[in-house]
Image (cartoon, grey):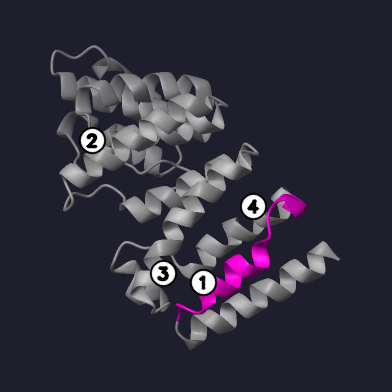
């Protein structure tokens, strides 16, 4: 799976097994060919998942607007966190920030309804959404997501990657790499140093040491 891909559907229907396999092994034309016969299937979920496969191919080829349209059709049927988050990422990367924002709210609401399902955790969705917003130069909106993420680290205190992973929280380094990009892009309109200092006070020794390194990098890049 490519790093920017929306999450692949984990519950596979037998009719689409060959299409999913083709997608996961990067035979994109084959994936579309195997999924296409089921786009108008009588079973709405089968049709929606076929759309999802075609949408993922479009997404992987950076045709975000077409991917978004297909993801929206699938989400209207499946109404789960994964499907709405697929709309979020594709809409945002297509430049449709408002559609992405609305879809993200629906993704979070769906995830809260089904907290034990296979969809990404809310913190992971927040981190990926922040990445997409950063890529679209929506820095203030991206910072809003980083601020939401910050609260998880402050509550947990421990910054060990495995500890965070099993709780569905992205590593501190993954979040701070995005945060640092946002801080640089906001320039003098945002005072990042007290933001980092305040966070550091809530973290363990490893977390504080890591944030000191981030401060050094940001100071040098500002210079």
Q: Nearer the viewer, mark 2 or mark 3?
A: 3
119 sits left or right of 100 in the view: left
Residue plotted at (64% across, 60% down): 180
- Cβ–Cβ under 8 Å for marks 3 and 1: yes
206 sits left or right of 38 in the view: right
Report how far apart the C-alphas of labels 2 and 3 lie in the structure. Answer: 27 Å
Q: How crowded is mark 1: few (under 14 residues within 10 Å), some or many (20 or more)?
A: some
How many discs mark residues in the rendered view? 4
Q: Which of marks 3 and 1 is in front?
A: 1
- Cβ–Cβ under 8 Å for marks 4 and 3: no
Disc 1 element? helix
Report how far apart the C-alphas of labels 4 and 3 lie in the structure. Answer: 18 Å
Question: Where does label 1 land, which residue?
Answer: 199
* Secondary structure mainly formed by the magenta segment: helix
Say whether disc 2 or disc 3 marks the residue closer to the N-terminus: 2
Q: Which residue lies furthest to the bottom in this view?
A: 205
Q: Read off the magenta span.
A: 187-203
Question: Where does label 4 land, which residue?
Answer: 182
Residue plotted at (43% across, 54% down): 148
Say whether disc 3 or disc 1 marks the residue closer to the N-terminus: 3
Q: Does the magenta stretch include residue 202?
A: yes
Q: Can residue 2 be seen in this view?
A: no
74 sits left or right of 103 in the view: left
Report how far apart the C-alphas of labels 1 and 2 lie in the structure. Answer: 33 Å
Label annotation for residue 19: none
Report how far apart the C-alphas of labels 1 and 4 lie in the structure. Answer: 16 Å
Say whether disc 2 or disc 4 marks the residue closer to the N-terminus: 2
Question: Where does label 2 land, which residue?
Answer: 80
Residue plotted at (45% across, 62% down): 150
Q: In which quarter of the image is residue 29?
A: top left
Say whether disc 4 or disc 3 marks the residue closer to the N-terminus: 3
């Amino acid at each position: 799976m490519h790093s920017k891909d929306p999450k692949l559907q984990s519950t596979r229907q037998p009719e689409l097994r060959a299409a999913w396999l083709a997608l996961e092994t990067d035979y994109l034309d084959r994936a579309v060919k195997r999924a296409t016969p089921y786009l108008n299937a009588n079973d709405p979920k089968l049709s929606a998942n076929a759309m999802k496969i075609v949408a993922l191919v479009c997404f992987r080829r950076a045709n975000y607007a077409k991917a978004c349209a297909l993801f929206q059709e699938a989400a209207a049927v499946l109404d789960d966190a994964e499907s709405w988050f697929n709309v979020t990422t594709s809409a945002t990367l297509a430049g449709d920030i408002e559609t992405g924002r609305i879809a993200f709210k629906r993704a979070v609401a769906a995830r809260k309804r089904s907290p034990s399902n296979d969809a990404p955790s809310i913190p992971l969705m927040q981190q990926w959404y922040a990445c997409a917003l950063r890529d679209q130069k929506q820095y203030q909106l991206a910072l809003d997501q980083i601020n939401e993420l910050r609260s998880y680290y402050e509550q947990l205190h421990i910054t060990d990657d495995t500890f965070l992973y099993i709780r569905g929280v992205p590593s501190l380094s993954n979040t701070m790499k995005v945060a640092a990009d946002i801080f640089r892009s906001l320039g003098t309109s945002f005072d990042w140093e007290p933001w980092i200092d305040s966070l550091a006070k809530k973290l363990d020794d490893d977390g504080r040491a890591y944030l000191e390194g981030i401060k050094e990098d940001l100071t040098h890049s500002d210079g």
